[in-house]
Image (spheres, rainbow, N blue to C red):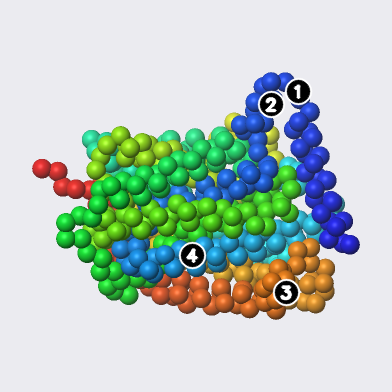
Amino acid sequence: MASEKVETVIAGNYVEMEREEGDSKSTKSKFSKFFWHGGSVCDAWFSCASNQVAQVLLTLPYSFSQLGLLSGILFQLFYGLLGSWTAYLISVLYVEYRTRKEREKVDFRNHVIQWFEVLDGLLGKHWRNVGLFFNCTFLLFGSVIQLIACASNIYYINDSLDKRTWTYIFGACCATTVFIPSFHNYRIWSFLGLMMTSYTAWYLTIASLIHGQIEGVKHSGPTTMVLYFTGATNILYTFGGHAVTVEIMHAMWKPQKFKLIYLIATLYVLTLTLPSASAVYWAFGDLLLTHSNALSLLPRNGYRDTAVVLMLIHQFITFGFACTPLYFVWEKFIGIHYTKSVFKRALARLPVVIPIWFLAIIFPFFGPINSAVGSLLVSFTVYIIPSLAHMVTFSSASARENAVERPPPFLGGWVGSYCVNFFVVVWVFVVGFGFGGWASMLNFIRQIDSFGLFTKCYQCPHKA
């Protein structure tokens, strides 16, 4: 009964908001709502899928060369499933937190709920601080990776400038995301972003099959433990894109409908990542070990240039996805989160972009940086902390009895969910953080030794 009442409360607030948005009958209002202001289940699905399959699409063949074909496929399926489970846990905790607060008559209509606030409301300030640290650090480096990817990609259609210079340029371009108020306003961008990555994925697949295998191709992976676990943590990173789950849910009119959205998004993403990574690895084999960006090995033509341009646009979108939660945190810190002026908020957000720009110039290691971020940050942010938080939140009998969302019956109820959570924590801590952290940091240090910090053009061919 309590669950039905709570659902009515949540839906009521959002229906009310939706009505306010729809009051105006003007053509301009309808146009704006159609392209600019989303909050449906479809909007959330596009946001999840678009955010998940970004520049990692170009580094997964590199991971396959480290892991071998079979391990690469199995790790994608395995981490896709784990990621969907922990995204579900985050959605459960969000609804639980929001329900409790709305019972206390708290109105969130002018406030964007974030993951660290969910942890604070359910578990206290220590959980909040840990969640805030890992989430912000991950999103910071997630934004850095998008900026690095922009420079890496544009170089393949215009090498008149080195990658560092392109990073300066795209840093300025990505700074314009400060003008996008919230995840409500990514409706058209999420849709376009997913179309762009879908084109790129199928371009990689078809172009590799047409190109055929290079002469003397070898598929020797895995060859070392370091390479194996480095590749595995890049895939861990690939399916760990749900650090923005809470913000995406909060942008929905009815967030309790989120439950299976991430799983369905993951299933679609697998139709892009598995064929493209397998085909590129089949064609180029071990050559990918020194070419972390798959586009660098395919012959230049109009199709490849189109893929590069589309990925550049998509990386701009994904930069906004990763950075927007950071903008919210900064707004709350300096006390302007409730300001309605888009221009004032945009100006206040600009300082967030500066460290991202700087870090992208220091560590331009496209590919290896994904694995380092995956093992050290993603492992805790979106796998370990949500699983532990779910177990602790519902550790008491009264909490389980009054839970808004109960575990799926097919998993065995509360006992089954606790077993799955325990497995996720142990596996990700030992394999993802432990072995993955060791391997990815060794590989990362090798890149620094080979190329140096602030390198002008990472993995660029030598010009005559």
Please report contact status of discs 3 and 4: CB closer than 8 Å, yes or no.
Answer: no
**Which is nearer the N-term, disc 2 or disc 1?**
1
x, y percent for residue 349: 55, 41
Which tag is nearer the camera, tag 4 or tag 2?
Answer: 4
Q: Residue 456 or 306: which is nearer the viewer?
A: 306
Residue 30's disc number: 2
Question: Is any atom of residue 53 visible in this view?
Answer: yes
Compared with residue 423, is residue 26 higher up or lower down, i.e. above or below?
A: above
Q: Is residue 102 left or right of residue 448?
A: right
Look at 74% across and 48% down and name the residue there: 254
Q: Amino acid at mark 2?
A: Lys
Question: Which residue does the numbered mark 1 point to in the structure image?
Answer: 25
Secondary element at tag 3: helix
Cα gap from disc 4 to disc 2, whole angstroms: 41 Å
Cα gap from disc 3 to disc 4, whole angstroms: 24 Å
Cα gap from disc 3 to disc 2, whole angstroms: 44 Å
Secondary element at tag 2: helix
**Which is nearer the N-term, disc 1 or disc 3?**
1
**Which is nearer the N-term, disc 3 or disc 2?**
2
Which tag is nearer the camera, tag 1 or tag 4?
Answer: 4
Question: Which residue does the numbered mark 3 point to in the structure image?
Answer: 413
Q: Residue 340 or 82: which is nearer the viewer?
A: 82
Cα gap from disc 1 to disc 3, whole angstroms: 47 Å
Look at 40% across and 55% down and name the residue there: 275
Question: Which residue does the numbered mark 4 point to in the structure image?
Answer: 77
x, y percent for residue 324: 56, 45
